[in-house]
Image (spheres, coloured by chain):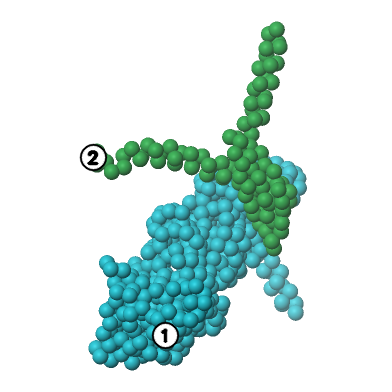
Chain colours: A green, B cyan
Amino acid sequence: MQKLFLIVLLFCFAVSAYAANASYVIKSVRVDGETLWTEVEYTFIDGSKKTIDVPHFQPKDKDTITQGIVNREASEKRKIDAQVTNEALKAEIYKDVNKSIAIIK
Amino acid sequence: MKKLFIFLLFIFVCFPCFSATCTFTGVTDSHWNDNDNWDGDVPTTADDVVFNASSPSCLIDATAVAKTINCTGYVQTLTAGANLTVSGNITLVSGMTFTPSTYTVTVDAVSTIASGGKTFGAFTVGSSNIITLADDMWVTGTLTGYASGASNFAGAYNLHAQGNILRGGTGATGFFSTTTTLLIDGGANQTLGDATNNSVIDMNLVINKSGGTISSPYIVYFAVNNSPTFTYTAGAFDDTGGTWSLRANSTYNVSGMTFLGTVSPTISIAPTITLTSDMNVSGTFNTNTNNTAKIFTMNGYNVNCKGAIASHSSGYLMAGTTVIQINGTGNQIWKARWVCNNVNINKDSGTLTIQDTAASVLYYGNGAVTVTPGTWTWTKGVVTVTGTLNIYGTTADVTLDTKGGMAWNNIIVFTNSFGKLASASDVNGNFTLNAGSTLNAAGYQMNVAGNWTKNATATFTTGNNTVVFDGTSTLAGSTTFYNLTLNPGSTNHLTSTQTFIVGGIFKAEGTSGSSITLNATIADSQAILPVTILGNISYVTVTDIDSSGGVEIYDANGTLDNATNWTLTPPSITFDALLLGGD
């Protein structure tokens, strides 16, 4: 029974770890001179999706392109996180709008 | 001959170490700076250094020099414990280990560098001689350019800059290549340039960072002679406080990033910029050079201006197919003088103020040069114009497509220029057609609140449009209108003795509380206003107007003084009106 519990626990952990990953789908690819463009649909951890044209300048191989796509996910995730943070900060700062606040040094 | 032979022999005997080969043997220990560890002595700048299959691991334990370093076949570890200067080729191989730590490798001569997949720590370019990459090269520390001249690279490979990137000097310094790409791909924070030297990059540039931010708080002069491409793939980019100066012909794939600082052409140089994606500018977008002989050209896609749009005070023309799209969500100010590109105002919020003073002038069009004038489009957003719009297109139509959604202050169609409307236009100030100019209203309504001035040699093509005067206006210069409407409350002075023909419908429908004034500029000297089709006319105070060339005008509840062919009596019912059942 204990083993079963552990297996179930491990399974749940593995599933949750898998679900925590972002993913992408390359929707199309085109070449414009020295630049290869991938149209990538990212699915972020929260399930939201965003489609982005990712340029790859003189890519040497598939790994280079993959690295660019993966890096861009990190950048876009960072932007989304920043927006969420900004909204939270905005709500916080909004409380102080038009208030006279003493500067304490 | 014999003497010469002896002399040469003497030379070779006296200088046995000239360009010698020094092989690392490590007999005593791993230290570079020990004569006993070399097949020869510790290398000098004239020596070719060899690490071969038999060489043991080596520690650069003191500042070291070499003419070249060849590690072909080396399988041990070369560790930097001090800086190393090489005056020629460097060949590292995949089978070896190179531990650069934070020490600097400087190359100060013509060189071919084969990295073998190894990573350099800090790397400094020590001369303007060409460094040819035989494969990709990684620099995890600071990449520093030559302090006294260009840092020239060759080889169609990537120079991976994963630390800070410093120009190294001023003047003709910077990073130059027609084939090598400067790839900024560090996983941590990086800085481009410094306050003393700024940056010059005249080679392909890619930002593809997995983490950290590339900061660029100084001036970056991008492009000189090599027409490089700037590609943004990934990574956080922050140029707050900095300027990207587009110095020469160059291409940009940068839709995924936003310039937070200033983007501008270099003053006095007018490059051609090619966008292969949108360019986002949250800082200031400077549209102009100050060189009246040159054109700053941007082709393709949009520049999304989310901040201020500025210009040099004596700036000249910005042209090309790129759309200057003003779509910031906050308040924006446009101080541009000369613009020829397509413009699209597309603001969800905030106000765009065009010109900062009422006396300033915006020139829109191609001026006297032979480029295609653009279209000024208003899509949405609040716009305030305080200066004067000069429509200045001397070779083709400059088009306004403002859909009546934004109001101009003054409009002048410049001498010998061509203007055209693509939708309704609203002028809160004066409208002027200079000598030899043409405005094709193309059937679209024009509202004018100020003066209407048409030079005798100017052409006003109505396209059967309606001109509405809705303020206090003086009309100067004989003009043929199609439909002419005087709005309630308006005051309209027609220049005495001049002729203003209404080829279509004349409407002047005042009310008891908002009457209309229509008179001539000189008392007792009539202006001529023949009307073809009579619209509703009421509460008009008419003085010194001669409409005898057209239909009789009935002014209900009006006041007439020296008004020819005007009457306060309703017109008699015509036979046609009876047949049509009219009244």
Q: Chain of mark 1?
A: B
The residue located at (64%, 22%) in the rendering is A13
Q: Which mark is residue B551?
A: 1
Q: Residue at x 58, y 63 (%)?
A: B301
Q: Is residue B442 above or below residue B299?
A: below
B274 displayed left or right of B479: right
Mark nearer the viewer, 1 or 2: 1
- Residue under pointer 2: A102
Q: Quadrant of the N terminus of chain B?
A: bottom right
Q: Secondary structure at mark 2?
A: loop
The residue closer to the viewer here, B459 or A82, is B459
Q: Is residue A45 left or right of residue A7?
A: left
Q: Secondary structure at mark 1?
A: loop
The disc labelled 1 sits on which kind of residue?
Answer: Val
Mark 1 is surrounded, within 10 Å at the Cα level, by few (under 14), some (14 to 19) or many (20 or more) other residues, namely some
Residue B528, position as x, y percentages in the image: 36, 89
Q: CA distance from mark 1 to mark 2?
A: 74 Å
Disc 2 marks a residue whose amino acid type is Ala
> In screen coordinates, is B30 left or right of B374?
right
What chain does mark 2 sit on? Answer: A
Residue B65 visible within the image: no
Residue A86 rendering spot, x and y as whole percentages = 44, 41
Is B271 in front, or is B445?
Answer: B445
Quarter where residue B19 is shown: bottom right
* Badges 1 and 2, same chain: no
Q: Quadrant of the C terminus of chain B?
A: bottom left
Please give the name of the residue rendered at 56% of the width and 77% of the height, measured from the top-left corner.
B372
Left or right of B460? Residue B45 is: right
User: Can the viewer see residue B428 in this picture?
Assistant: yes
Looking at the image, which residue is at 48% across and 39% down?
A84
Residue lying farthest top? Answer: A1
Residue B272 image position (x, y, % from top left): 56, 71
